């Protein structure tokens, strides 16, 4: 089951502020991406290196199983009539976009890592 972890939910405008302001909700949710290539291959080592080198603003989280994921809290505003399904869909789309971009970065990093290894092996022969 897919989930989006809501970190905060705040009401803005309308009765709480200027009555002429449109009421909206600020929702902060934790998004998660995994160190997978675009082919779906999980590579903890390369993903961890990418997180540690500062190329992204995602935080590495180690799970009890030893696997990792990267997390980031994203904040978005929604109109007061938005449904839970709409909120979920908006965050899920953002998470999927981030995953696709990170997977592209993983592809490049995996190729570079293999190239460096092959180059070192050639020097040792």
Image (cartoon, rainbow, N blue to C red):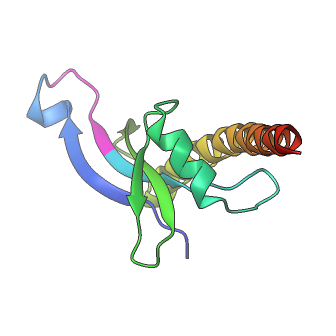
Q: Residue at x 20, y 30 (%)?
A: 13
Q: Which residues are magenta?
A: 19-27
| Left or right: 110 in relation to 32 | right
| Left or right: 120 in relation to 75 | right
Q: Residue at x 24, y 50 (%)?
A: 8
Residue 95 is a magenta residue = no
Along the line of sight, the residue nearer the viewer: 99 or 55 = 55
| Residue 3 image point, x, y percent | 48, 66
Above or below, 52 relative to 31: above
Res 115 quadrant in image: top right
Q: Residue at x 78, y 45 (%)?
A: 117
Along the line of sight, the residue nearer the viewer: 121 or 67 = 121
Quadrant in which the C terminus appears: top right
Residue 90 visible at all? no
Quadrant in which the N terminus appears: bottom right
Residue 73 visible at all? yes
């Amino acid at each position: 089951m897919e989930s989006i972890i809501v970190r905060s939910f705040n009401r803005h405008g309308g009765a709480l502020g200027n009555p002429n302001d449109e009421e909206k909700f600020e929702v902060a949710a934790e998004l998660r991406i995994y160190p997978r290539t675009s082919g779906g291959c999980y590579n903890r080592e390369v993903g961890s290196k990418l997180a540690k080198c500062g190329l992204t603003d995602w935080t590495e989280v180690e799970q009890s199983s030893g696997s990792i994921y990267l997390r980031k809290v994203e904040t978005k505003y929604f109109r007061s009539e938005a449904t839970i399904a709409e909120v979920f869909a908006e965050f899920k789309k953002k998470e999927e976009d981030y995953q696709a971009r990170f997977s592209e970065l993983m592809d490049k990093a995996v190729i570079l890592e293999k190239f460096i290894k092959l180059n070192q092996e050639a020097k040792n022969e």
